[in-house]
Amino acid sequence: MGRRGQNKLADYLCDVTMDRQKSWNKERSIVMPLAYNWFATSDGGAKLHCSACGWAVGIHFKADGSHHFEPLVGGGTCLDPRVNSFLAEALAIEQATLAMKELMLWHR
């Protein structure tokens, strides 16, 4: 999944949250490779009926000659409809950053 694919993931998570009008979080476990880099992606948006943000944090690693992106945690927060897209984006970045911090402390 390249940079564009990761952006599509964040956009999808934000859209799902707005469509469902419900906040959510999801975690998954994988066997961690020996060498990896952390990655976070986030998006926020606003529609007439709801504003939301979506985010995911995972790892990027190379295996068998190809690059892999594995999301480990993700979530979406349904926000007050009065929240504009700029604030929704900022909240998405904040949530992704906090999740990444927790993961990085856990996987030292």
Image (cartoon, rainbow, N blue to C red):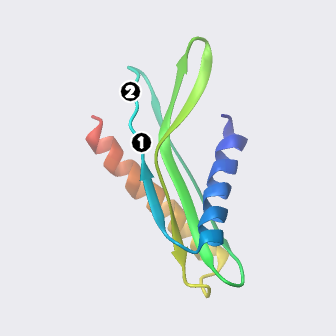
Q: Mark 1 sits on what residue?
A: 28
Residue name at image x 47 percent, y 56 percent:
96
What element does badge 2 sit on?
loop
Mark 2 or mark 1, whichever is nearer to me:
1
In the rendered image, the vertical position of residue 88 relative to residue 94, given as above or below? below
The percent coordinates of residue 79 (x first, y second) are 54, 78
Neighbour class for label 2 at 10 Å: few (<14), some, many (≥20)? few
Q: Residue furthest bottom?
A: 82
- Image quadrant in which the N terminus is located: top right
The percent coordinates of residue 105 (x first, y second) are 28, 43
Residue name at image x 64 percent, y 49 percent:
9
Residue 32, disc: 2
How many discs appear?
2
Q: Residue furthest top?
A: 64
Q: Quadrant of residue 54?
A: bottom right
Residue 107, visible in the rendered structure: yes
- For badge 2, the amino acid type reads Met
Residue 89, visible in the rendered structure: no
The percent coordinates of residue 73 (x first, y second) are 44, 48
The percent coordinates of residue 62 (x first, y second) are 54, 20
What element does badge 1 sit on?
loop
Q: Residue furthest front?
A: 20
Position of residue 5 in the picture relative to residue 95 (left or right): right
- Image quadrant in which the C terminus is located: top left
In the rendered image, the vertical position of residue 33 relative to residue 20, given as above or below? above
In the rendered image, the vertical position of residue 95 relative to residue 65, given as above or below? below
- For badge 1, the amino acid type reads Arg
Q: Quadrant of residue 82?
A: bottom right
